């Protein structure tokens, strides 16, 4: 119980913290207003706060004495007092650290002076003074230095650095042996330091050639003994970079707090002992006390703003905070484990009741907040999905599915399922791409491999038709028809899920010889043709609602791992608006298969599929592409080329050599005749699909030539072939522009042919 309680309290305080952090963002930025608006606040990594201002005469500072220069030619940029040579390394609310000038004097073996540099700095035109944190230091074994200066009056002092031999010099502190330090008076405004020697270093020159004197921050200088005495250049460099001179800065050195009254809200003024005054934020406040609106309260309960730790209940107050133990506890909440349980006997009931009330209160608030946070996001997503679902006809589909007598074969996949199956529609899962959309290879959680087709945008009026298609297709169960497993309507576009057919398209097997299509014997061709024809015949007559495929072509006939034929890609063509048929079909690149009668009249019948199938048959017999630029102008179209050859009695000239070898003359002649009838320009004169299937079946019964039997390739051998799928409608067959005259030039091609009885060799 207690554990739960503390847990909830912790969660709540965390939450509160996060909320207050989020809401305190703007105010944090406000309090960051350290300078006047429009003024530069940074020079390199130094922050310059008002009353200082960057830019001489820029108006950013309180007055000219606080003008600074930021020289950006240096990298990193350097900050200087006014436009002088006093570089600033750090500024605090009452001090600043500037360049330390070092005086030195060096001697040669004979006591001759080789270098003599004195050091002086003047702060006369500023309200600043040298801080007493500085010490005047003299380093050397035969040196004394004088420092003279002004602090309202004149000041002078000196210090001796003497030693006999290096061993005498203590390492680490300034004792007077080799190193001497002296204090300076407060309010020192200028100084001038110079070195002198007793014996011109003649006795110590072997280990100490130079003497040094400087005014610098005592705590940042550490004397290293004999090492510092012997290596002058190293010593100079080290002191120059490590030891800075500390200044105190005040506002108007000739006025006091009483006269000035300059400090802004929640800050107070203090007179400086060097003259002048400073403002500082009151305890519990922070900000810039010189700029309106003054200092702001520190939220001690916010760990971002303060380093105070409260182990109980923290309440921020103006300028302070209350840190108390949680109800039911007593003690010091500011120390860890400072709180202990109030003796249970004294006030058992109220504490328990209060605790319970708190627990339930917090639980309610928490769950409310969590609900709001996650609810908003989820609801947005769900709304979008629902919108797509409706736009894609999901409601209609549901109605249909709920109607009695419909199969439950259609699976409604969710967006997440399909995204997971396709690795979020990742590029490397794409197995085909084309006019209708993109096909991905997907793996369902039950390890089933599926083809997932994501259609292009469908307009809303098409959705019912699309749903109808889906419904019909899920009810078409034929071993030579690709099975539609389900769909997803929650996506922006409908997504269809098919069984995955692994062995590429018939087009690929006929025309792409690189794979070595040894299985594609005449016998296999006949089998594929029969399977495809019977599937189409079934669709035309036996399926619950006749289905016209409308896009029969060798790229829409797939082969599975056993080289079983699978007709694919029905529904998709129905997604296309009827009045846009031609356009879309042309774009799809199935020109070579298009029924010319349908092309002219737009009257779609099952005979259009027969025509297209005739072209596929012609492909199987000749091994030629439906459209080929290799053939001469008039013969580009395989259909016209084939019919012309039949008319001219040249069928055996265009049959593929292997087919010619393996098929009998009777078979080939009958097949050629069947193709010719399928390609009849008048749909009514074409056989229907069932008749085509039956005639093809009949061809199988023709006897094969005895000498061809050994040549028949065993299909088993080629079963191991693994080819990548290229999804049917997504094949891009090159387009050759067509004039409608070409169709007409072959009208009346139904005259019967005289076949030669002998097989040409
Ligand atoms: C500024 O940068 C220097 C080195 O570039 C570093 O030594 C110094 O500590 C930095 N100062 C601040 C206030 O970050
Ligand atoms: C900045 O420093 C460079 C190099 O020391 C000097 O030449 C230049 O005059 C300086 N610019 C200003 C504005 O002080
Ligand atoms: C500082 O003192 C040295 C030596 O006493 C003298 O030469 C120099 O002029 C003085 N400099 C100033 C600015 O007083
Ligand atoms: C030290 O050198 C200065 C000038 O070089 C000279 O006037 C002085 O006499 C020398 N003192 C000694 C003790 O050699
Ligand atoms: C002085 O110190 C520097 C750097 O530590 C070193 O390179 C140089 O050799 C030293 N010189 C002498 C004379 O010891
Ligand atoms: C303080 O000094 C400034 C210049 O340093 C001068 O303008 C001002 O009149 C002085 N104020 C008083 C009260 O002496
Ligand atoms: C001091 O700070 C408190 C809390 O931030 C604020 O309400 C108040 O107005 C401030 N006082 C002045 C004089 O600005
Ligand atoms: C802070 O604590 C003091 C004494 O513990 C109490 O008088 C005061 O009301 C508390 N203030 C708030 C804001 O809780």
Image (tube, rainbow, N blue to C red):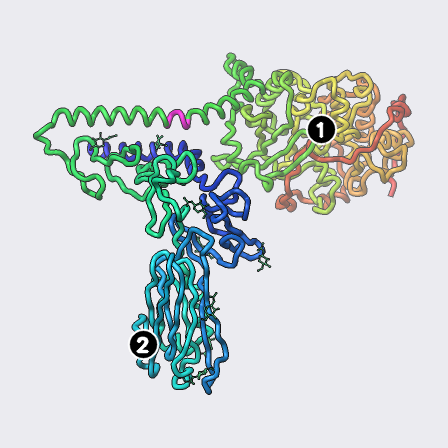
At horizontal 43% and vertical 54% (from top left) the residue drawn is 90
Q: For mark 1, does the 10 Å Cα neighbourhood hold few (<14), some (14 to 19), or many (20 or more) residues?
A: some
Spot occupied by residue 552 in the image (x, y as percentages of width and height): 72, 27
Looking at the image, residue 676 sits to the left or right of residue 496; the answer is right
As drawn, the residue found furthest toward the left would be 345
In this view of the protein, which residue sits in the foreground, 520 or 636?
636
Residue 505, quarter of the rendered image: top right
**Mark 1–mark 2 distance (CA, rounded to whole Å):** 120 Å
Q: Look at mark 1 in the image and give the residue it sits on.
A: 697
Residue 307, quarter of the rendered image: top left
Looking at the image, residue 538 sits to the left or right of residue 339; the answer is right
Please, is residue 361 above or below residue 299 in the view?
A: above
Looking at the image, residue 97 sits to the left or right of residue 492; the answer is left
At horizontal 26% and vertical 39% (from top left) the residue drawn is 310
| The label number, if any, that marks residue 177 in the structure image | 2
Spot occupied by residue 333 in the image (x, y as percentages of width and height): 21, 39
Q: Quadrant of the N terminus?
A: top left
Please, is residue 107 above or below residue 332 in the view?
A: below
Q: Quadrant of the C terminus?
A: top right
Spot occupied by residue 162 in the image (x, y as percentages of width and height): 34, 78
Q: Which residues are magenta?
A: 370-374
Any part of residue 537 in sight: no
In this view of the protein, which residue sits in the foreground, 595 or 645?
595
Any part of residue 175 in sight: yes
Please, is residue 218 above or below residue 289 in the view?
A: below
In this view of the protein, which residue sits in the foreground, 368 or 496?
368
């Amino acid at each position: 119980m207690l554990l739960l309680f503390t847990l909830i309290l912790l969660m709540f305080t965390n939450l509160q913290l996060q909320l207050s952090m989020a809401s305190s963002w703007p105010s944090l930025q406000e309090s960051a207003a350290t300078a006047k608006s429009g003024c530069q606040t940074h020079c390199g990594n130094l922050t310059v706060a008002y009353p200082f201002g960057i830019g001489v005469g820029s108006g950013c500072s309180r007055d000219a004495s606080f003008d600074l220069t930021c020289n950006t030619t240096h990298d990193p940029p350097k900050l200087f007092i006014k436009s002088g040579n006093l570089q600033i390394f750090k500024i605090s609310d009452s001090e600043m650290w500037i360049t330390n000038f070092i005086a030195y004097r060096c001697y040669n073996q004979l006591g001759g002076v080789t270098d003599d540099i004195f050091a002086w700095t003047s702060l006369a035109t500023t309200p600043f003074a040298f801080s007493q944190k500085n010490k005047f230091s003299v380093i050397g074994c035969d040196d004394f230095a004088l420092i003279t200066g002004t602090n309202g009056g004149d000041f002078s002092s000196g210090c001796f650095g003497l030693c006999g031999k290096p061993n005498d010099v203590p390492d680490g502190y300034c004792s007077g042996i080799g190193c001497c330090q002296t204090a300076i008076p407060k309010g020192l405004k200028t100084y001038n330091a110079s070195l002198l020697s007793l014996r011109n270093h003649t006795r110590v020159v072997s280990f100490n050639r130079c003497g040094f004197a400087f005014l610098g921050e005592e705590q940042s200088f550490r004397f290293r003994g004999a090492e510092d005495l012997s290596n002058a250049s190293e010593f100079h460099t080290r002191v120059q970079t490590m030891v800075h001179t500390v200044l105190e800065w005040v506002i108007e050195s000739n006025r006091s707090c009483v006269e000035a009254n300059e400090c802004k809200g929640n800050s107070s003024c203090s007179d400086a002992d060097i003259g002048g005054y400073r403002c500082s934020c009151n305890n519990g406040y922070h900000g810039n006390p010189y700029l309106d609106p003054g200092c702001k309260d520190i939220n001690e309960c916010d760990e971002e703003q303060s380093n105070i730790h409260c182990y109980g209940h923290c309440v921020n107050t103006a300028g302070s905070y209350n840190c108390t133990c949680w109800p039911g506890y007593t003690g010091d909440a500011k120390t860890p484990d400072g709180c202990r349980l109030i003796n249970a006997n004294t006030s058992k009931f109220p504490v328990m009741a209060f605790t319970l009330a708190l627990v339930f209160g917090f639980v309610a608030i928490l769950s409310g907040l969590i609900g709001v946070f996650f609810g908003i996001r989820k609801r947005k997503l769900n709304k979008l999905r629902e919108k797509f679902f409706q736009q894609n006809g999901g409601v209609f589909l549901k109605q249909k599915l709920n109607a009695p007598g419909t199969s439950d074969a259609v699976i409604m996949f969710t967006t997440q399922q399909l995204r997971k199956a396709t690795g979020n529609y990742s590029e490397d899962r794409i197995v085909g791409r084309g006019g209708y959309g993109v096909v991905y290879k997907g793996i369902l959680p039950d390890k089933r491999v599926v083809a997932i087709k994501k259609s292009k945008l469908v307009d809303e009026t098409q959705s019912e038709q699309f749903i109808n298609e889906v419904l019909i297709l899920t009810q078409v169960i034929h071993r030579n028809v690709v099975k539609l497993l389900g769909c997803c309507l929650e996506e922006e576009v409908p997504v269809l899920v098919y069984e995955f057919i692994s062995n590429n398209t018939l087009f690929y097997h006929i025309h792409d010889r690189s794979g070595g299509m040894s299985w594609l014997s005449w016998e296999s061709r006949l089998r594929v043709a029969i399977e495809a024809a019977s599937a189409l015949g079934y669709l035309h007559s036996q399926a619950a609602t006749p289905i016209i495929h409308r896009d029969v072509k060798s790229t829409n006939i797939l082969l599975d791992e056993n080289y079983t034929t699978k007709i694919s890609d029905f529904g998709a063509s129905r997604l296309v608006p009827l009045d846009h048929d031609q356009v879309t079909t042309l774009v799809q690149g199935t020109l070579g298969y298009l029924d010319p009668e349908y092309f002219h009249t737009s009257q779609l019948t099952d005979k259009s599929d027969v025509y297209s199938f005739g072209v596929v048959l012609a492909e199987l017999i000749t091994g030629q592409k439906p459209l080929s630029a290799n053939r001469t102008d008039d013969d580009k179209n395989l259909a016209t080329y084939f019919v012309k050859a039949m008319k001219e009695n040249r069928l055996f000239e265009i049959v593929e050599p292997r087919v010619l070898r393996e098929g009998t003359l009777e078979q080939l002649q009958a097949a050629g005749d069947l193709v010719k009838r399928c390609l009849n320009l008048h749909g009514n004169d074409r056989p229907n699909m069932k008749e085509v299937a039956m005639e093809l079946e009949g061809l199988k019964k023709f006897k094969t030539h005895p000498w061809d039997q050994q040549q028949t390739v065993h299909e088993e051998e080629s079963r191991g072939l693994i080819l990548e799928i290229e999804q049917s409608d997504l094949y891009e067959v090159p387009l050759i522009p067509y004039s409608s005259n070409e169709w007409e030039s072959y009208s009346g091609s139904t005259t019967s042919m005289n076949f030669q009885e002998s097989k040409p060799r």
